[in-house]
């Protein structure tokens, strides 16, 4: 149910191994070998790579087999941006950072510096602990301060995490904490106005916009989605079975991502090129995985499509809807899909599960499923308004999104998931992109909320739940 899993669903890295046993191997200087491998891979020059292999290697792999291997398994990763050694024992090992992924490259050289063997494997960093305590704005004065610090340290001291921003709403008061850095080596602490990707928490904004138009009578939860889609899609009978409600509570039967999502996809920024043309083309041919309304199956496609439908009935872009209906009324000044040059100064760098910097994700047609960037301060305002808002149109919209629409496991409202514990209902959603994680949970009766934002693709759900249990 986590947004970041979408990339793993798109780009499946199979175990890649191309090895010929060698009789001997002498330790040799290997940076020069890596320099050449980088050059030849980036040039797609398999002939030159073959010339670097020994006679014993060629007994197992001829030139044609080697060419097929590189064309199918290596070149799709794009160009090698950089490489670094990760160990020298019986074989030399290097981490190769490609445009679209990472591989571990190990090899054995013969006495004249030719490859006796080489192996490509999925790269997985070893997670250790930081040598020194990460910086924090936490003054460790109150009992809560110390509890938050104890919880946050388990996360931020990992070698593959970078920055963390935490917000708590209790007794009408907001308290925030920053840990780590906005970017590696910057020494800049995240604060409550630091901007992060929030991933699938965006889905609760999409549900709120939907609720607004339901309350205005412009759309109904029972409407078939085909009512709001181009006539060219009516030929697909599968679509006639799906209602607007099904899109919002993940019971549509639509797949997690569109069947044609990989078309022209940039693995480093997977949603940027998926426009309405591709969306509607994919819908014309899509098949449902389950009958609508019968089973929960988390779908970025469904909520992204809901965002498109809301754009079509309003005549506004998704970003305009968020600003007009939610962020401007609530004075959430740093919540939007696209950032201004001034806001970009406060936007974090983002890092994958190994702690390597990658690029943020940009969204096109499927903006409604995960495009927003925000801050802890803004999301605390959002949570506070979900609990009680004096602005009637929004109050009515939030109330509607909290109504349970699916009672099996998991329990779902509109956009929100419900955690029911000790007789209380907690509305929550998490999020993740290629380099970020987020978590928001609130309770309307107890008037409490917790927000956790990270610029690392390492789950923060446990942080949010652990802090919640300290304040209830």
Image: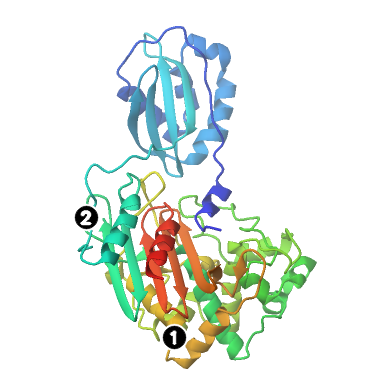
Foreground: 426 or 216?
A: 426
Count of numbered tags:
2
Query: Is 225 displayed left or right of 108 in the figure?
Result: right
Foreground: 423 or 183?
A: 423
Q: Can you tell which mark lies on residue 115?
A: none
Residue pointed to by mark 2: 135
Q: Residue at x 63, y 66 (%)?
A: 250
Q: Residue at x 68, y 62 (%)?
A: 254
> Is the C terminus in the top left, top right, bottom left or bottom right quadrant?
bottom left
Q: Position of residue 367 (x, y in %)?
A: 51, 68
Residue pointed to by mark 1: 388
Q: Does residue 265 appear anywhere in the picture? A: no
| Applied colour scheme | rainbow
Q: Position of residue 109 (x, y in %)?
A: 40, 15
Residue most extreme to the front: 422
> Is the N terminus in the top left, top right, bottom left or bottom right quadrant?
bottom right
Q: Position of residue 191 (x, y in %)?
A: 26, 66
Query: Is 470 displayed left or right of 8 in the figure?
Result: left
Q: Residue at x 62, y 70 (%)?
A: 249
Instruction: Tell me the crowding category of disc 2: few under 14, some 14 to 19, or many 20 or more residues within 10 angstroms, Cα based.
Output: some
Of labels 2 and 1, earlier in sequence is 2
Relative vertical location of residue 207 with respect to residue 268 in this rendering, above or below: below
Q: Does residue 454 appear anywhere in the picture? A: yes
Instruction: Tell me the crowding category of disc 1: few under 14, some 14 to 19, or many 20 or more residues within 10 angstroms, Cα based.
Output: some
Query: Is 256 displayed left or right of 231 in the figure?
Result: left
**Residue 171, picture quadrant:** bottom left
């Amino acid at each position: 149910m986590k947004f970041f899993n979408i990339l793993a669903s798109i780009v499946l890295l199979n175990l890649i191994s191309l090895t010929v046993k060698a009789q001997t191997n002498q330790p040799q200087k290997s940076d020069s070998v890596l320099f050449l491998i980088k050059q030849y891979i980036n040039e797609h020059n398999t002939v030159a790579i073959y010339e670097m292999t020994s006679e014993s290697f060629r007994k197992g792999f001829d030139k044609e087999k080697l060419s097929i291997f590189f064309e199918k398994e290596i070149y799709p990763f794009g160009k090698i941006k950089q490489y670094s050694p990760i160990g020298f024992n019986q074989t030399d090992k290097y981490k190769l950072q490609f445009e679209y992924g990472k591989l571990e490259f190990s090899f054995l050289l013969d006495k004249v510096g030719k490859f006796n063997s080489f192996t490509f494997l999925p790269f997985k960093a070893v997670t250790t602990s930081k040598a020194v305590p990460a910086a924090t704005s936490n003054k460790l004065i109150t009992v809560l301060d110390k509890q938050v610090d104890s919880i946050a340290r388990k996360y931020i001291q990992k070698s593959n995490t970078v920055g963390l921003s935490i917000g708590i709403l209790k007794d009408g008061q907001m308290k925030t904490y920053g840990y780590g850095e906005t970017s590696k080596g910057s020494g800049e602490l995240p604060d409550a106005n630091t901007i992060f990707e929030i991933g699938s928490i965006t889905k609760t904004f999409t549900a709120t916009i939907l609720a607004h138009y339901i309350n205005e009578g412009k759309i109904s939860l029972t409407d078939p989605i085909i009512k709001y889609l181009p006539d060219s899609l009516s030929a697909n009978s599968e679509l006639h079975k799906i209602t607007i409600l099904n899109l919002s509570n993940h019971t549509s039967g639509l797949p997690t991502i569109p069947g044609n999502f990989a078309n022209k996809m940039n693995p480093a920024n997977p949603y940027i090129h998926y426009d309405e043309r591709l969306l509607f083309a994919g819908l014309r041919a899509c098949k449902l995985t389950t009958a609508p309304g019968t089973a929960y199956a988390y779908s970025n496609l469904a909520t992204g499509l809901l965002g498109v439908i809301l754009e079509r009935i309003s005549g506004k872009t998704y970003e305009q809807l968020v600003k007009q209906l939610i962020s401007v009324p609530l004075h959430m000044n740093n919540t939007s899909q696209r950032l201004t040059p001034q806001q970009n100064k406060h936007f974090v760098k983002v890092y994958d599960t190994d702690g390597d910097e990658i690029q943020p994700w940009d969204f096109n047609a499927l903006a409604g499923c995960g495009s927003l960037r925000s801050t802890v301060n803004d999301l605390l305002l959002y949570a506070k308004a979900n609990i009680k808002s004096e602005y009637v149109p929004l109050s009515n919209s939030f109330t509607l999104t909290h109504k349970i629409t699916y009672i099996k496991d998991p329990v779902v409202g509109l956009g929100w998931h419900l955690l029911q514990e000790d007789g209380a209902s907690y509305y929550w959603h998490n999020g993740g992109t290629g380099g970020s994680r987020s978590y928001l949970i609130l309770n309307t009766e107890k008037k409490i909320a917790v927000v956790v934002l990270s610029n690392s693709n390492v789950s923060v759900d446990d942080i949010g739940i652990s802090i919640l249990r300290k304040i209830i």
